[in-house]
Image (spheres, helix red, strand yellow):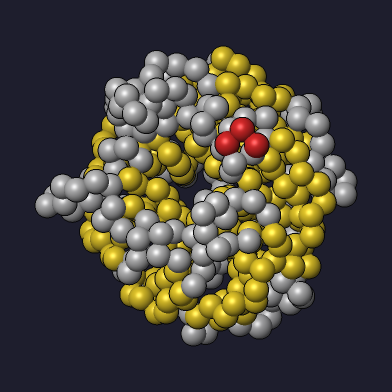
Amino acid sequence: MKMARRCFFSSLFCLLAILPAFPQSPNQKLLVFAGTYTDKTDSKGIYAFDFDRSSGTLTPRGLAVATSNPSWLVIHPNGKWAYAANESGKQSTISAFSVDAKSARLTLLNQLPALGEDPCYLSFDKTGKFLFVANYTSGNVVVFPILPDGKLGEHTSAIKDSGVLGPNKERQEAPHAHWIEADTNNHLVFVADLGIDCILIYGFDPNTGKLVAPPFRVALAPGTGPRHAFLSPSDRVMYVLGELRSTVTICLPDAHQLFRATQAISTLPPDFKSRNDAAEIVVPASGSWFYTSNRGLDSIAVFDVRYQPMRLISTVSTGGKEPRHFAIDPTGRFLLAENQNSNSIVVFRIDPATGALSQVSTTEGVPSPVSLVFYPAQ
């Protein structure tokens, strides 16, 4: 417990879908890889695009690699390798690829069983030696070592989440791990579990790749359904996106220096009463505002943290259906949202003074896009 408290407030999560720390290209283009669902669509796997930072437009580069249901993508900090969660029920796998940025192609290195059903989130430990996996349907988290050649090795840890189930009988019938990240000191791993309305905090040994249970818990309001989270150690605030209630819960430290849920803010305008599932949360480097996506209202919600209490200031239509994921480019000037059910990627320009969004371009014909990562073009 004492070790966890010492580490807790020096924690810093990577931004969701953040660019790895390798050199920027001097030109105006960035390479983008988009993961898709291949079941019941025309998609073949992961697609590549050039993103022009001067105009905010995407140019298709074609299929980067054929692979089944690559619903979440990450690029290793060294820029040499990429990893995909192949979300296919009991046949789910995790794939490792080498990256050829010049040709915008990925080459399979190896593929291992996910050791769970429907992996939906991947991230790295702070050394880049381990890959974390959150398996949604089976409600477990797994750690794979990354070998010197980029391949995945035999797993070092696999733990099933446990806890009191939430009240939503349809969606909270079991634990459902949906997000996993390590802290800056690399001794704690945070997991958002939609089924049990908790952020779980496991101990982590970066030498062996072992997770330590039982975890600490940050309890959320029943029925929240935590999907993703973001922790800001400088502000000592954790933002937790609740998929089921379409809320952002603000968690602050208590007297024992452990987080407790305080304020919950809706991602929806007051007059919206239809079905909605919140999907993604991204906090830009400025920290003055943040964004979430709504599936149902089909919009990006803009929150301003300069006001106390924080508040929702606008929702901006994505011009399509089911914006499951979105990402901000490395310059912080553009937000790219993927409309899963209308096969499009929409680019918004971010106002640097207010965080407001204005639509710049739309790329149609991207089959079922659900994940997006940036890579500097060569």
Which residue is located at x 68 percent, y 80 percent?
Answer: 26
Q: Position of residue 304 (x, y in %)?
A: 29, 56
Q: Outermost residue, right direction?
A: 148
Measured from the top left, where is residue 12 in percent x and y?
55, 42
Asked whether the viewer can see residue 87, the reply is: yes
| Residue 15 drawn at (x, y percent) | 52, 51
For the point 42% across and 79% down, which residue is it? 361
Q: Which residue is found at the position 59% from the left and 77% from the top? A: 60
Observer-nearest of 131 and 49? 49
Q: In terms of depth relative to the viewer, which is nearer, 109 or 263?
A: 109
Q: Quick check: 5 above or below 372?
A: above
> Taking 170 as reference, is 126 above or below it?
below
Viewer-side residue, 32 vs 39: 39
Residue ID at (68%, 40%): 93
| Side of 41 relative to 319 (left or right) | right
Give the quadrant of the N terminus. Answer: top right
Q: Relative to 8, does residue 103 appear above or below in the rendering? A: below
Q: Looking at the rendering, which quadrant does residue 219 occupy? A: top left
